[in-house]
Image (cartoon, rainbow, N blue to C red):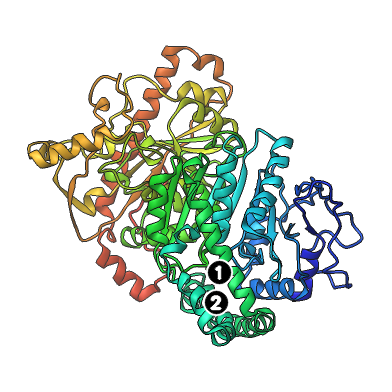
Amino acid sequence: MATAVTAAIAAGIYPLTTHRDATPRISTIFKSKLSVSASAVRTEKQAGPSVSDNGAVAKKQRAPAPSSGALEERRSTLRDYLEQSRELISRSDGGPPRWFSPLECRSPLKDSPLLLYLPGVDGVGMGLSLQHQRLGKIFDIWCMHIPLTDRTSFTDLVKFVESAVKTEHSRAANRPIYLVGESFGACLALAVAARNPDIDLVLILANPATSYGKSVSQSLLPLSEVMPEQLGSSLPYVLTLLLGNPAKRVTTAVRDNLSSEHVIEELSQETIAMSSYLSVLSKLFSVETLRWKLNLLKSAAGFANSRLHAVKAQTLILASGQDQLLSSTEEAERLRQVLPKSKVRLFEDSGHALFLEDGISLISILTATSFYRRGQRHDHVSDYLPPSPSEFRRVYEPQSWIDAATDPVVLSTMENGDVIRGLAGIPSEGPVLYVGYHMMLGFEIVPLVSRFWIERNILLRGIAHPMMFSKLKEGRMPDASAFDSFRIMGAVPVSAPNFFKLFSSKSHVLLYPGGVREALHRKVGEEYRLFWPEQSEFVRMAAKFGAKIVPFGVVGEDDIGHLLMDYDDLRRIPYFRDSIEELTGEVVNLRSNAVGEVSNQDVHLPIIVPKIPGRFYFLFGKPIETKGRQQELKGREEAQGLYLEVKSEVEKCLAYLKEKRESDPYRNIFARLSYRATHGFDSEVPTFDFGHKAQQ
C-alpha cells in the first residue's frame, strides 16, 4: 500500500522555486523503481506536467475518472494518510518547497478551477488525502510540500504561493483559484489574498492559526529554550493527539454499517501505521526544527493579522469546537466580523485536523455553503455537486426519525391509471416537474426527497424560498447553516432563470406553488387547502422543454401535531407581532405584486403541540405530458387551462388520501409497532386497500 501510494505521488512531485531565472528540475526524491497500484494512472515513463520558472504548474492530460460507485468503494482512511505522510517525510530532501498533484485527483469536469492546498506548520501536504478522490473530480488539485528541514521564511513562502497564483490567473482569468489552508496554511492564504485583491481567490480556512497569539501553543516556544531535550523527544507523540478521536471513528464505522471485525482490523492497522509514522518523526524531528516551526508559526500569524484589512476574497472559515491547539471557534467569529465576504461553519465535535476526521466532506461543505463555482459567480444548477451515497446518509440520518415515526405510504399512478404502492409510476427520464401540496412547515420534505433517492435513485431539485440562501440583514432568522442540508440535497432559489436551467438539464424538479403561505396556513378551514396564485407560473416553461408534470398530494400533518397558535393568534400578542415583523424584514418578499392570500408571505413560527404519531400518505397522480404541446400552450388561455387541470389533480389526490386513510388499520404508530414486533422490524407495514384505479 505505502509503496504504491508513494509511486502515485512521485510521478507528480516537482520542486518549485521563486527565482525567475532558475531552471526547474524534477525532484530526485523518488528515483527508485516502485510498484504502481492499478489506480495510478501515470507511471515514471509517462510525461509529467512541466513547471514554469515562477512556480506555476502547467496543464496536464487527464485520464477518465472512475464512477462514483468505485470511488465509494476505495474509501481512504487515516492509515492511508499516515503511510503516505511517512513515505513523503522519510524520502524528502532539504528543500526547497514544491507542489505535487496526487494521481487519484483526475478532473473530468470542463473548466475545473485550480485548488492549491496549503498545509499546516508540519508542511507535509497530505492533509486532504482522505478527500482527494472526490475533490479530484471537480478541481485541479496541487498540494504544497515543505520538507521538514527546509528553512524558507514565511515571506518567501508567501511569494512562492503568490507566484503560482499569478501565473495560473494569467492563463484563466475568468476562473477562480481556491486556496485551502489549514492552520498555518490559512495564514499563507490570507497573506496571498491581501497582496492580490484583484485576483479572484476563494479562501477555505480550516482552524486558522491567526489565533496563535492567544493559544496555548505559543507557550511551547519558551519551553523549547528551557527544556529542549524533554520537549523535543515528546513532541512527535503529542502531535499525534491532533490526528482525530478513535472513538469518533468507531461511531462513524457503526453509522456506515461496517462490521465489528472490519472496525477492529482498521483500528489495528491505524495503530501500526501510527507507530511507523512516529518512528520517522522521532528520527527527523530535532529541537532546532521545533524552534524553527514555532517561530515560523508566530511570523505567519503576525503577518496575516496585520493585513486582514486588505483581504477582499470570498472566504469560508471552518472552525472545530474541540481544537486542542488553537482557539478556533472564537477566532472564526473574529475573522467573520473583519473579512467582508466571509461565512463560518462550526464543527462542534471535531479536533484540530478537521479534514482527517471521518464524516467531514469538503465537497459537502462547499455545496452546503454555495462556495463551489467554476466562473465568476456561483450557478445553483451547473455548479451543483450531487451528494455521494455516504454524504446522503450523513444528511438523512439525523432526519430519519421522521420516516420512522410516520412510516409513509407512497403511492404512484401508472399510465393506465392503476394506483400502485411505491414509485414505479414515476417517469425515469427528465425533465419532470412535481407539483403538489406543501404541508405545515414542510414536514413532508424529508420523506419525499429520501424516498425518491433510495427507491428510484432520483435527486429532486426543490424550488426553495431565497431565505434558505441569503438574508437581507442579520437578526432573528436562523443562521444560514440551518439550511445546509437542503442545499446539499439540491435546493435551488426560485427564479425563472433557474427554472430554465433545471429543465434544460433534464432535472426532476419539485415545486410548491403555495409557497410560504401554504406551509404556514391557519387553523380554521385551511388544512389541506391550496393557496396557489391565480395565474399560471410554470406551465409554459414546462411545455418549452416537453417536461412531464406530476401532480401529487400528501396528508398526515394533522396526525403528528395540533396547531395551537397560528399567524392570527400570534399577531394579537405584541412580542410575537414584533418578532414576525422583524423576521419578515430580514428575507426577500416574494409575490409582493400578487393578489389574494398567496401574497401574504409573513415569516413566523406557529406553535404546534405534538401528537402520538399517525401516518403520512403520498399519492402521485398520472403524469401529464406537455411534449409536442409547446405551440398550443404558448397561449395564455391554454396555459391557464392546464394550470387549473394540475391544481384540480392535486386536490383530487388530497381528497383520495383523506378518505382512504380512514380505513388504514395501521394508521396509529402502536398498531405499526405491534405488526413489526410479530413480522420483523424490516417488514413493510400494510395499509388501506387502494384498489386498481384512483378515484376520480
Q: Position of residue 152 (x, y in %)?
A: 69, 61
Labels 2 and 1: the sequence-earlier one: 2
* Residue closer to the observer: 583 or 462: 583
Give the residue at mark 2.
239
Let me know if residue 135 appears in the view.
Answer: no
Q: Position of residue 218 (x, y in %)?
A: 47, 69
Badge 1: how crowded within 10 Å, few (<14), some, or many (20+)? many
CA–CA distance between discs 2 and 1? 13 Å
Give the residue type that dot 2 points to. Answer: Leu
Q: Are marks 2 and 1 in contact (CB under 8 Å)?
A: no
Q: Is residue 504 above or below residue 678?
A: above
Q: Position of residue 623 (x, y in %)?
A: 48, 35
Give the residue at mark 1.
294
* Residue closer to the observer: 600 or 422: 600
At 18% across and 50% down in the image, what residue appears?
Answer: 608
* Residue closer to the observer: 54 or 419: 54
